[in-house]
C-alpha cells in the first residue's frame, strides 16, 4: 500500500480556542523514497447554511443553498518539491488560530441546516504518473469561556390537563398532576441539564417520560429567513408506570459537536430547547417546552 | 509327556551324570550371628537424610573437609560435596542473595506491604463477603420456566465498517435505536440461554475484531431485554444471564483503556490517580461516557453506564462517588418494581466491587426500594400478574435474590446500629414478610439469632396472604443453625417455631422447613427433643407416601442428626431413628443413607463395641447395603460397601467372650455372603480370634479352648471355598493352615494344605487385576515360595508317606501347564532345592511352638535323608534337562541366567567338597558364560564372593573352586 499520509494533531481531544496555536505533525509513511511536487497544509473554517425544503421548496433548497461563510482559511507550504526518504517521516507544523478583521471563530457545531466546521487538509502533489495524496482531518474550536458568572434561572413547572394547550377534547383526558423543576434554563454546555420531576398522580398508567433536546436553527437569506426545529436526541428518564410522589431525576448530558453555546449572528441563529414528553398508556402525549440558553464557562 | 510322579527316570539323564545335592550342613545359629550387622555407633544431630538441605557457604566448606568419613557415612550422603554447589564455589546463589539483603530494610518492606494490604483490605471486600458468583448458580437453578420466551433483537449487519468519526458513530447508534427488529419467538428456556450465550460470544468477537461500536450495540440490545417482563418467573435468571454479559463488557472497556495508559513499559499501579493517565486514554474514556449518555432508553443507559462504572477512575478521583448517587436516583425512573429492584441489585454489586467503602448509596438504594414498595400492590403490577397467571406469593419470591443481595451488601461489616435501623424501617412497612425474609437471609446470623423471639413475633404478625410463611421460618431456621440464640430463649424458640411448622399442610413446605429446624434441635437439645421432631416428620411424611417426593430433605435430616450425635448408642436409642430410616423406600436412596451412617460410625466410633442396640441397628443397616448388591452393581460400589461393612466388623468386640464373638462372625457370614471382601475379612477376623485364644492360654489349650479353636478353624475351612478369587483362596488356605498349625490342630492344618495343593492346578494363566488381564505366574511363584517355607515345619502325617505334601505339591507343579518359553517352573524347582537342603539339617531354622517338625520326628534318620536325596536327584535332573533343551532351542540368554541361578543355589546350599557337585558347579559356571550372555559384572562379583568365603574357616575348598572358575572377557 504505497505511500500513506496522516495528520496527527497534538491535543488528544483536538480542541482549540481562538488565539491558540494549533500544532501537530504530518506523518508520511512509505516503503520506498517518495518523489513529490510539494506538500502543503491548509486550514479552513466555514459555516455552511442549508435552506430547508419546508421553508423554500424542494427545488430551491437543492440549488439555492446559501453560500458558505468563510471564517478562516490559510495555507502553509510545508515541503518544497523533492524527495522524501523511505520509512516514516514526521513533519511538524504550527498554525496560529487568528482571524482577520471582524470575523469571529464560531464554535464547532454539527447541525442540520447550520454546520460550523474546521478542517486541516494536507495535500501532497505528485507527478503526472502518481495520484496526488490528500488527507483531511477535523479539529474542534471552542469559543472563549464567557466572563462573569452564570446566573442560574430555575424553572418550576406543573402539568395538568388544564395547563395544556392544543387539546382537542379536554374531557377525554385522564386526570394527572406532574410537578417538577429544572435547576436552570441557562446551561453550561459541559454540564448536564438537571432537575426533578414528580408524578403526583395520574389516572392513566405512564408509559414513558422523555427529555427531547431540540435545536432551532434560523438561516437568513434574500427571501427572508427560515426557522426550523429538529430533534438532537431523546433521552428517556422514566420507563413504565413510575411510583407516584417519588421525585425522578431529570438529567441530560449535552452531546458534544451537536450542541454549542447559543449563537446569534446576522446571517444565522442556533438555539436550543428541551421538551419534557410524557407518554401515557392510552397513547396520550403530553409535552412541555423549555427554551434553553447554552453557554460555555 | 513325562510320567506322573517324580521317580527317577534313567532315560532322561543324557550326557549329564546323576547328581544328588549333598546338602551343606548348616549351623543356623552361628550363621545368624555372623550375618548380623555390626553395631556401629552413630553420630546424632549432625545429619539426617530427611532434614531439608540448607546449603550455606560455611557449612559446605566444612563438609568438604569432613568428607573423609568414607564408605560408612556415604549412606548419609550430605557429606559428599554437591557438584553443583562446588561449581559455584560452594555458595548457593540464593542464600548469597538472602545474606546480602539487609534484614532491616527487608523488615521495613514487609511492614509497608502489610500496611498497604491492611489499607486495601479496608477498601476491598474481604473473603467473608459471599460473592455474586456463588449466588448466580442458585438463582439460575431456582427461577426457571417452561413457558416460551422471546427475544426482540436487531439484525446487526456483520462487518459494518467502523468509521473514526464520532458523527458516524452516533448515527450508527441512532440506527440501532430505530433499526430493523427481528423477533425470536417461542424459545424454550434453554434456547434462550443459548441465544444469550451467543450474544456474549459475539460481543467478545466484535471486541477482539475492533468493532467497538458493534460491541456496544450488542450490550445495549442485551440490556434492553431486561425491560421485558413477560414470563416474569424467569426474570431473575434472565437478569443473571444478562448481567454476565454486562460484566464482560465492563471488563473489556476497562482493560482497553488501561492498556492505553501503559505507554512506556511501566504498568500502572492498582491504585493509580487520574493525573497519571494520558490524554488519549482519558479522551477514549470520555468518549465512552458521552456515547452511553446518548442512549435513548433508560434501562440500557443505566445498565451500560453501571457496567463501566469502574472507568470513572481514569477521569477523576471523585467520579465514582458522584456517579453512584446519580445512578441510584436514575433507577427511580424505572416503573416496574421488579425491574427496578434488580437494577438496584446490579448497581450495588458493581458498587461493592469498585468502591465498597461508599456505603451511602447502598443504603439509599434500599430506602428508595422501600419507598416504591407500595407499587407491588398497585394496579399495574396486579394486572400484569393476572395476565401472566402468576400468584402473588410466587411473584414475591422473585424479589428475594435482588433484595437479599442489596441487604447483604448493606449488612456487610455494618455496625449493629444500622441493622437495627434497617429493621425498624422494614417494620414500619407493616411487617412485610418479603422484607423480613430478606433481612433474615442477608443480615448476620448472630444478629438474627440474638433477636429470634422478636422475629418469631414479627413472623406471626405477618398477614397470611402474600409471602409464604414457611419460607420465613425456614430463613430463621437457617440463621439459627449458624448462630446460637440466647440460652434462655432456646426451648421457647423451638416450641414456637415447631408449633407453626407442624401445622403446615403441604408436605413439601413442611419438609423444607423441618429440614432446617432439625439442625437447630440437634444442636441445642437432647435425644428426647430430636425424637419428638423425628416422630413429627414421620407423621407428616407418611400419609400418601409424601416421603417419596422429599428424599433429599429427609436425607439431609439424617445427615444433620448424625453430625450432632456421634455416640451411636445414644443415636440408636432415639426411638424414632430406625422408623425414620424406614421412610427411605427407594433402594438407591436407602443405600445412600446407610452409607452415610456407616461412614459416620467408622469415623467417629473410637472404641470397639458390643452394645446390642448398636449391633442390631448397624447389622440392619449393613444388611440393607449388602442386599442392594446385584448383578448390575459396579465394582467400585461393591468395594465401597464392603469397606464400610468391614469397618463395622472390625469395630465389634465382645472382649473375652470369644464364643459370642465367633457366633457374631457366623451371623455376619450368613448376612454378607455376597460381598467377597467381607468374607475375607471374616476369615481373617476368625483367624485372629484363634490366635487371640492361643495368646490368652499362653499356647496351652485346655479341652474347651481346643474345641473352640477347632471351631474357628472349621469356620475358615468351610468359608474359604465360597470365595471366587483363586489367590484369595490359596493365601487364606495357607494362612489358616498356619493358624491351625500354631494352635496344634495338625490334621486340620494338613487339610488346609492339601486343599491348597489341590487348588494350585486350577490357577488360570491370566487373572483379572483392576480390570486388566495380567499373567498370574508372578503371583503363583510368590505363593509357592511362601508355601514351601511353611511346608518345612509341617510334620509328616503318620499314615501318609514321607514328605507327602512336598511330593504332592511337586507333582502338581510338574503337571501344571506352564507358559511356554518361561522358566518359572525351573525357578521353582531351584527353590525347592533350598527347601530340601533345609530339611536335611539336624535342627530346622524355625519351628512352631509345641509342634514337632520332621527334624524331631525323624531325628535325622538316614532313610528320611535318602528320601530327600531322591527327590533332590529328580529335581536336579529336571533342571539339567531343561538347561539342555534351552541349549537346543537356542534360548541361550535364558540358559545362561538359569545356569547361574542354579550355580548360586549350589554355592549357597550344596556341599562343594563333594567332587561331583563341585564338577557340576564348574560346568554350570562355564555354561553360563559359554555364549557370552553372562553379565561380566555379576560374574566378577560372584567370584569375589567365593574368594572371600574361602577365607572363612572350613571353607578352604572354595579357594580351590575359585581357581577352577575362569572369567571370560567379552570379545
Image (cartoon, coloured by chain):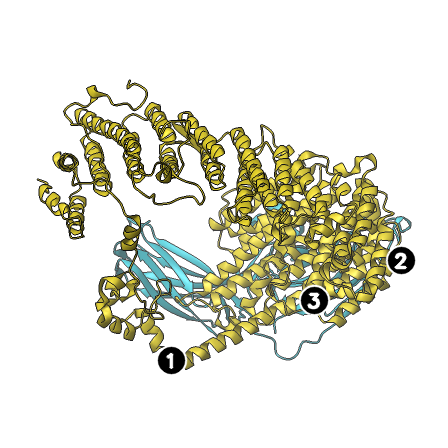
Image point (78%, 52%), residue name: B530
> Which mark, residue B675?
none
The image shows residue B395, relative to residue B315, as above or below, that is: above
Q: Secondary structure at mark 3?
A: helix
- Front: mark 2 or 3: 2
Given residues B57 and A114, the one toward you in this image is: B57
> In this rendering, is residue B208 above or below B724?
below
Marks 2 and 3 sit apart, C-alpha to C-alpha, by 31 Å
Q: Earlier in the sequence, mark 3 or mark 1?
A: 1
Give the color of chain A as drawn: cyan
Q: Is residue B378 visible?
A: no
Residue behind mark 1: B102
Q: Is residue A274 left or right of residue A49?
A: right
Mark 3 → mark 1, Cα distance in angstroms: 47 Å
Q: Which corner quadrant holds the C terminus of chain A?
A: bottom right
Are discs 2 and 1 less than 8 Å apart at CB? no
Reading the image, the residue beneath label 2 is B461
Which one is in front, B332 or A3?
B332
Q: Are marks 2 and 3 on the same chain?
A: yes
Residue at numbered disc 3: B361
Q: What x and y, as percent, mark residue B7?
A: 28, 23
- The subunit carrying tag 2 is B
The color chain B is rendered in: yellow
- Identify which residue is drawn at 44% across, 41% down: B851
Q: Chain of mark 1?
A: B
Q: Are marks 3 and 1 on the same chain?
A: yes
Amino acid at each position: 500500500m504505497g505511500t500513506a499520509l496522516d495528520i496527527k494533531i497534538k491535543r488528544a481531544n483536538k480542541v482549540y480556542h481562538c488565539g491558540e496555536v494549533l500544532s501537530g505533525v504530518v506523518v508520511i509513511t512509505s516503503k520506498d523514497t517518495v518523489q513529490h511536487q510539494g506538500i502543503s497544509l491548509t486550514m479552513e473554517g466555514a459555516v455552511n447554511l442549508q435552506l430547508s425544503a419546508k421553508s423554500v421548496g424542494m427545488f430551491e433548497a437543492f440549488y439555492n443553498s446559501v453560500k458558505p461563510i468563510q471564517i478562516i482559511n490559510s495555507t502553509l507550504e510545508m515541503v518544497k518539491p523533492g524527495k522524501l526518504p523511505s520509512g516514516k517521516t514526521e513533519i511538524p507544523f504550527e498554525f496560529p488560530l487568528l482571524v482577520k478583521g471582524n470575523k469571529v471563530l464560531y464554535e464547532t457545531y454539527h447541525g442540520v441546516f447550520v454546520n460550523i466546521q474546521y478542517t486541516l487538509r494536507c495535500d501532497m502533489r505528485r507527478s503526472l504518473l502518481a495520484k496526488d495524496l490528500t488527507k483531511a482531518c477535523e479539529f474542534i474550536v471552542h469559543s472563549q469561556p464567557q466572563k462573569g458568572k452564570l446566573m442560574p434561572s430555575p424553572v418550576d413547572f406543573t402539568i395538568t390537563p388544564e395547563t395544556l394547550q392544543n387539546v382537542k377534547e379536554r374531557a377525554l383526558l385522564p386526570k394527572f398532576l406532574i410537578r417538577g423543576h429544572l435547576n436552570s434554563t441557562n446551561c453550561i454546555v459541559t454540564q448536564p441539564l438537571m432537575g426533578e420531576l414528580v408524578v403526583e398522580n395520574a389516572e392513566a398508567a405512564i408509559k414513558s417520560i422523555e427529555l427531547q433536546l431540540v435545536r432551532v436553527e434560523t438561516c437568513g437569506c434574500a427571501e427572508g429567513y427560515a426557522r426550523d426545529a429538529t430533534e438532537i436526541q431523546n433521552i428517556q428518564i422514566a420507563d413504565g408506570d413510575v411510583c407516584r410522589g417519588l421525585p425522578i431525576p431529570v438529567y441530560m448530558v449535552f452531546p458534544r459537536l451537536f450542541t454549542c453555546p447559543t449563537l446569534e449572528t446576522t446571517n444565522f441563529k442556533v438555539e436550543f430547547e428541551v421538551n419534557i414528553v410524557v407518554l401515557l398508556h392510552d397513547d396520550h402525549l403530553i409535552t412541555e417546552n423549555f427554551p434553553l440558553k447554552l453557554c460555555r464557562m | 509327556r513325562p510320567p506322573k510322579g517324580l521317580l527317577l527316570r534313567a532315560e532322561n539323564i543324557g550326557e549329564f551324570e546323576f547328581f544328588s545335592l549333598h546338602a551343606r550342613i548348616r549351623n543356623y545359629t552361628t550363621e545368624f550371628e555372623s550375618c548380623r550387622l555390626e553395631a556401629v555407633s552413630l553420630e546424632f544431630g549432625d545429619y539426617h537424610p530427611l532434614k531439608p538441605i540448607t546449603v550455606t557457604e560455611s557449612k559446605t566448606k566444612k563438609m568438604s573437609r569432613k568428607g573423609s568419613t568414607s564408605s560408612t557415612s556415604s549412606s548419609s550422603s550430605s557429606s559428599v560435596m554437591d557438584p553443583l554447589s562446588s561449581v559455584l564455589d560452594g555458595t548457593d546463589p540464593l542464600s548469597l542473595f538472602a545474606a546480602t539483603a539487609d534484614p532491616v530494610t527487608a523488615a521495613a518492606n514487609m511492614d509497608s506491604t502489610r500496611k498497604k494490604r491492611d489499607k486495601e483490605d479496608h477498601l476491598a471486600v474481604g473473603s467473608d463477603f459471599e460473592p455474586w458468583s456463588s449466588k448466580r448458580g442458585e438463582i439460575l437453578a431456582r427461577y426457571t420456566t417452561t413457558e416460551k420466551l422471546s427475544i426482540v433483537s436487531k439484525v446487526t449487519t456483520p462487518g459494518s465498517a467502523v468509521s473514526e468519526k464520532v458523527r458516524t458513530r452516533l448515527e450508527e447508534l441512532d440506527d440501532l435505536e430505530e433499526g430493523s427488529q427481528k423477533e425470536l419467538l417461542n424459545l424454550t428456556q434453554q434456547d434462550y440461554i443459548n441465544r444469550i450465550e451467543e450474544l456474549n460470544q459475539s460481543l467478545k468477537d466484535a471486541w477482539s475484531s475492533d468493532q467497538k461500536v458493534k460491541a456496544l450495540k450488542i450490550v445495549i440490545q442485551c440490556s434492553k431485554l431486561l425491560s421485558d417482563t413477560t414470563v416474569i418467573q424467569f426474570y431473575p435468571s434472565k437478569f443473571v444471564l444478562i448481567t454476565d454479559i454486562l460484566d464482560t463488557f465492563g471488563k473489556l472497556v476497562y482493560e482497553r483503556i488501561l492498556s492505553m495508559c501503559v505507554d512506556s513499559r511501566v504498568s500502572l499501579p492498582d491504585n493509580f490517580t487520574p493525573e497519571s493517565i494520558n490524554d488519549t486514554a482519558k479522551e477514549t474514556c470520555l468518549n465512552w461516557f458521552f456515547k452511553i449518555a446518548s442512549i435513548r432508553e433508560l434501562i440500557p443507559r443505566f445498565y451500560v453506564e453501571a457496567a463501566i462504572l469502574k472507568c470513572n477512575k481514569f477521569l477523576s478521583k471523585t467520579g465514582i462517588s458522584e456517579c453512584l448517587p446519580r445512578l441510584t436516583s436514575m433507577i427511580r425512573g424505572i416503573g416496574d418494581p421488579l425491574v427496578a429492584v434488580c437494577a438496584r441489585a446490579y448497581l450495588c454489586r458493581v458498587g461493592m466491587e469498585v468502591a465498597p467503602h461508599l456505603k451511602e448509596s447502598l443504603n439509599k438504594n434500599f430506602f428508595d426500594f422501600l419507598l416504591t414498595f407500595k407499587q407491588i400492590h398497585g394496579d399495574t403490577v396486579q394486572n400484569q400478574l393476572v395476565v401472566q397467571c402468576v400468584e402473588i406469593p410466587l411473584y414475591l419470591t422473585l424479589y428475594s435474590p435482588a433484595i437479599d443481595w442489596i441487604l447483604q451488601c448493606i449488612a456487610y461489616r455494618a455496625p449493629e446500629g444500622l441493622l437495627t435501623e434497617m429493621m425498624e424501617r422494614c417494620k414500619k412497612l407493616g411487617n412485610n414478610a418479603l422484607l423480613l425474609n430478606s433481612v433474615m437471609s442477608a443480615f448476620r446470623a448472630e444478629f438474627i439469632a440474638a433477636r429470634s423471639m422478636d422475629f418469631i413475633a414479627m413472623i406471626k404478625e405477618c398477614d397470611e396472604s402474600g409471602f409464604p410463611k414457611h419460607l420465613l421460618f425456614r430463613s430463621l431456621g437457617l440463621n439459627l443453625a449458624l448462630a446460637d440464640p440466647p440460652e434462655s430463649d432456646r426451648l421457647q424458640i423451638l416450641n414456637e417455631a415447631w408449633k407453626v411448622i407442624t401445622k403446615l399442610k403441604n408436605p413439601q413446605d413442611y419438609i423444607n422447613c423441618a429440614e432446617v429446624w432439625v439442625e437447630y434441635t440437634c444442636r441445642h437439645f437432647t435425644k428426647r427433643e430430636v425424637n419428638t421432631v423425628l416422630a413429627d416428620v414421620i407423621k407428616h411424611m407418611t400419609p400418601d407416601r409424601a416421603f417419596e417426593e422429599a428424599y433429599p430433605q429427609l436425607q439431609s435430616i439424617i445427615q444433620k442428626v448424625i453430625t450432632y450425635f456421634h455416640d451411636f448408642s445414644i443415636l440408636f436409642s432415639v426411638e424414632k431413628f430406625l422408623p425414620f430410616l424406614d421412610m427411605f423406600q427407594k433402594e438407591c436412596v436407602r443405600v445412600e443413607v446407610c452409607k452415610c451412617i456407616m461412614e459416620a460410625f467408622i469415623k467417629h466410633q473410637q472404641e470397639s463395641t458390643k452394645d446390642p442396640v448398636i449391633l442390631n441397628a448397624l447389622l440392619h443397616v449393613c444388611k440393607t447395603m449388602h442386599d442392594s448388591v446385584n448383578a448390575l452393581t459396579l465394582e467400585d460400589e461393591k468395594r465401597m460397601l464392603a469397606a464400610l461393612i468391614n469397618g463395622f466388623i472390625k469395630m465389634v468386640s465382645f472382649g473375652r467372650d470369644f464364643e459370642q464373638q465367633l457366633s457374631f462372625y457366623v451371623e455376619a457370614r450368613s448376612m454378607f455372603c455376597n460381598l467377597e471382601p467381607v468374607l475375607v475379612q471374616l476369615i481373617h477376623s476368625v483367624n485372629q480370634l484363634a490366635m487371640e485364644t492361643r495368646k490368652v492360654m499362653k499356647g496351652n489349650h485346655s479341652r474347651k479352648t481346643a474345641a473352640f479353636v477347632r471351631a474357628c478353624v472349621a469356620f475358615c475351612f468351610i468359608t474359604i471355598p465360597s470365595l471366587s478369587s483363586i489367590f484369595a483362596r490359596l493365601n487364606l488356605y495357607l494362612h489358616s493352615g498356619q493358624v491351625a498349625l500354631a494352635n496344634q490342630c495338625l490334621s486340620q492344618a494338613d487339610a488346609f494344605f492339601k486343599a491348597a495343593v489341590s487348588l494350585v492346578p486350577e490357577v488360570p494363566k491370566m487373572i483379572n487385576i483392576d480390570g486388566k488381564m495380567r499373567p498370574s505366574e508372578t503371583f503363583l511363584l510368590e505363593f509357592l515360595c511362601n508355601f514351601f517355607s511353611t511346608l518345612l515345619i509341617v510334620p509328616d502325617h503318620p499314615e501318609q508317606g514321607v514328605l507327602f505334601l512336598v511330593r504332592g505339591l511337586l507333582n502338581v507343579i510338574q503337571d501344571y501347564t506352564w507358559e511356554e518359553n518361561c522358566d518359572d517352573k525351573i525357578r521353582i524347582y531351584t527353590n525347592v532345592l533350598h527347601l530340601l537342603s533345609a530339611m536335611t539339617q539336624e535342627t530346622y531354622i524355625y519351628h512352631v511352638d509345641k509342634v514337632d517338625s520332621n527334624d524331631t520326628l525323624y531325628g535325622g534318620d538316614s532313610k528320611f535323608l535318602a528320601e530327600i536325596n531322591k527327590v533332590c536327584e529328580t529335581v536336579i535332573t529336571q533342571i539339567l534337562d531343561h538347561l539342555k533343551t534351552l541349549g537346543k532351542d537356542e534360548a541361550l540368554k535364558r540358559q545362561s541366567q538359569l545356569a547361574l541361578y542354579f550355580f548360586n543355589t549350589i554355592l549357597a546350599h550344596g556341599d562343594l567338597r563333594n567332587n561331583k557337585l563341585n564338577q557340576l558347579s564348574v560346568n554350570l559356571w562355564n555354561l553360563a558364560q559359554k555364549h557370552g550372555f553372562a553379565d561380566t559384572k555379576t560374574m566378577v562379583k560372584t567370584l569375589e564372593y567365593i574368594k572371600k568365603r574361602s577365607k572363612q574357616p572350613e571353607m578352604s575348598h572354595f579357594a580351590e573352586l575359585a581357581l577352577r572358575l575362569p572369567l571370560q572377557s567379552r570379545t
